[in-house]
Amino acid sequence: MQEHVYRTYKSMLFGLAYRMLGSAADAEDIVHDVFAQYLQTDKRDIANERAYLTKMTANRCINVLNSARHKREQYIGTWLPEPMPDEGWQDEASAQTERKEMIGYAYLVMLQRMTPLERAVYVLREALRFEYREIAEILERTELSCRKTYSRARKAVGLDAGGDGTGLSKEYAKPDRVRLQYQFVEVFLRAADSGDFQPLVTYLKEEVTLVSDGGGKVRAAIKPILGLERVLAFLTGLSAKGRFEAGFRPIRMNGEPGLALVEARKCTMLISIEWEPDGSRIRHLYIIVNPDKLQRFNRGSLGTSL
């Protein structure tokens, strides 16, 4: 029976924790602790296993986020979420309850602008499809309070305060967006090989921002790089210094096309992109070079190739 509960809910709980924390390692630790405590719990008073386990996981995530606030403030450069290879992070049991498209990297970055409570309400509503009544019970808030928190969360990331629980899934899973992502990956691969990044102009908006995360472990731009000309100059400079000489590989990460720089069979850089909501241009380039956040791409596989 315990094994059945573990198999049924492990992936869902990991998805909740990963979305809230932006760290796969921390998410795994929390899920492990939740099941360890659940094994010692008297089950006779538990009417809804899914809600009970979700409550334990969400509350732990809120506590971790609150305690990690100072640590994040001391982080060298911009903190970005840990990316994930596509393969192996979900199973069929979770596929029926999760919006799988809502694990995209830009989505994870966006969640960082929310408070821990807003993040919990938003993920429970948007990704896991809980009703407000259920969210209120899980977080021990009133239903009205959860509705207001959800509204604040949407406003915090520039979305209208609707309530159908489908806002981001509509924005981040459009077929045209996926096609353009594949096109951009191909154009970037050619640009990195030639050292000429001018063809990227077709895809990047004038106010594009490049954000890199080295975590003080490796060299990276400490502050975001703003504007098309500066971003192109930055990429051109890295190429001229031989930074891209090893060559990129097109991969799938967080359910979307991405790029991995592979040196001596080791991933040393990942690039993800964020589009404007209307799909017209790319507004953010995310470059992850912190080796702690690349470990899952160096465990015998770089993830699924395109």
Image (cartoon, rainbow, N blue to C red):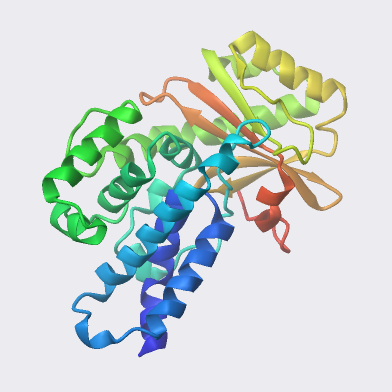
Percent x, y for residue 169?
32, 42
Image position of 155 with respect to 62: above or below? above
Percent x, y for residue 196?
75, 17
Percent x, y for residue 53?
33, 70
- Is residue 298 visible in this depiction of the protein? yes
Hey, which quadrant is residue 154 in on the image? Answer: top left
- Is residue 302 visible in this depiction of the protein? no
Nearest the camera: 230 or 303? 230
Nearest the camera: 71 or 235? 71
Tell me which residue sits at (85%, 21%) in the image: 240
Tell me which residue sits at (55%, 43%) in the image: 81
Tell me which residue sits at (27%, 37%) in the image: 167
**How many numbered callouts?**
0
Hey, which quadrant is residue 86 in on the image? Answer: bottom right
- Viewport quadrant of the N terminus: bottom left
Percent x, y for residue 14?
45, 63
Image position of 170 with respect to 292: above or below? above
